[in-house]
Amino acid sequence: MSLVNKNDAVRQGFIDGYEAGYANGVRLGQSEAIIQKAMRDRDAAPVWDIRVLYVTSGKGYPYEPLDHAIIGSLRPLVREMIIGNCANDPIRIGSPESDLETLAAVHKPDLMLILDGMNLSLDVVDRIRGMGVRTAIWLTDDPYYTDFTISMAPHYDFMFTLEVNCVSLYQEMGCAHVHYLPLAFQPDMFRPKAVPNGHERDICFIGSAYWNRVAMFDKLTPYLANKRIFISGIWWERLKHYELLAPQIQLNTWMPPEHTATAYNGAKIVINMHRAYDDQAYNNNSRRILGASPNPRTFEISGCGVLQITDLRADLVNFYTPDYDIVTYSSPEELVEKMDYYLTHEEERKQIAMRGLYRTMRDHTYANRLSTLLRVVFGQ
């Protein structure tokens, strides 16, 4: 390379780096202003003068981040919090299951709140409930495992499900107080942030390759093959033309939340695609209960201040406004059309993403959800 060409390359590199840094700085500055406004506009959460025994899911990753998010969000809302574990919980935050009854007897909590509960003996729940302790469970995977979770209904005072279509099921099965409470996002983890060089992408998708997703991505492959993409998750070798996308797929990996947030922040568009309610290979939903409610990724993606294009679930409109703070699709053709549009209409893309960030930060944090849960159990 000649000296002139080298100097030109250095000059161009400086210009490109300045422009990228400036654009990133503007985005982060705008995001922070929106976050601060959302926090001011958020309803103030009271502090309940109660003692809560929180029981972790006992499943480790990928439930571990949920446990940590709930623990961090619940602790400021109550007078005292005790943490207990299901048996053999790999994250070992609190005491094992064998000690839950002791914890309940010693601390006399006003509420025992369990996440998921699939690894917790219902006999333990019954005995603690027999001590006069209110019991509540927050179910994380409805409607996909309802064949198992219906047996829990008679054993809890309160059931909270993230699927609106499961409320009547648990009521019919014997729980008197069943409430719809979707999961949320943790602002400390999923938020706008700078990303390392080399992480910039046009389109991102993170999740397992369930068969409904494989069928969709098989149709998207010709379009995605010509874009800068990032896909991460298990089973993606199932794609018919896997080799076309393979260099841009991180195969058979469970991404921790901090890496997931980085991937979201590095993308112009993040696709969200819910798993199928009737997947015979991976579901235990023999009643074929339709999934109508948004998944947790809905809130995590928008919490990063990026444009989310999601399949339209019936209850999504109670959380976001399509084409205002989120974008929806109903077919592969519509998804391609909208991705192509928003990749070439940058300002519209950014405006929708920022409105989604505001709505998410104001309404859809774990602190919001847990405040709702406590109001249901204890009143205002």
Image (cartoon, rainbow, N blue to C red):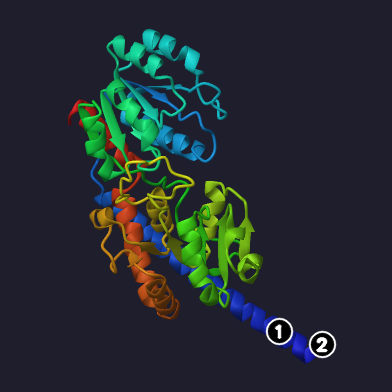
For the residue marked with disc 2, what is the amino acid? Met
On the image, the x and y values in percent for residue 103 come to 42, 12
Crowd around label 2: few <14 · some 14–19 · many ≥20 (10 Å): few
Q: Can residue 340 be seen in this view?
A: yes
Give the x, y percent position of residue 95: 50, 18
**What is the CA distance from the residue labelled 1 to the residue labelled 2?**
10 Å
Foreground of the two, 348 or 34 = 348
Q: Is residue 173 left or right of residue 250?
A: left
x 56%, y 23%: residue: 88
Residue 198 in sight: no
- Which residue is nearer to you in this view: 284 or 189? 284
Q: Residue at x 22, y 31 (%)?
A: 172
Asked which quadrant contains residue 168, the reply is top left
**Residue 1 numbered mark, or none:** 2
Q: In which quarter of the image is the C terminus?
A: top left
Which is more toward the observer, 300 or 316? 316
To which quarter of the image does residue 322 belong? bottom left
Q: Residue at 43%, 29% (x, y): give it.
A: 118
Instruction: Using a 10 Å C-alpha cutoff, classify the residue at mark 1 as few (fewer than 14 neighbours), some (14 to 19) or many (20 or more).
Output: few
Q: Residue at 31% x, 14% y: name it.
A: 129
Q: Which residue lies furthest to the left in this view?
A: 380
* Image position, residue 207 (x, y; %): 51, 54
Q: Is mark 1 on a helix, strand or loop?
A: helix
Residue 9 is tagged as 1
Check whether the beta carbons of the residues at disc 1 and disc 2 lie within 8 A of each other. Answer: yes
What's under tag 1, amino acid-wise?
A: Ala
Residue 250 image label: none
Quadrant that contains the N terminus? bottom right
Check disc 2 and report its element: helix, strand or loop. Answer: loop
**Closer to the camera, 277 or 14?**
277
Relative height, residue 91 to residue 251 (above, below): above
Q: Which of marks 1 and 2 is nearer the N terminus?
A: 2
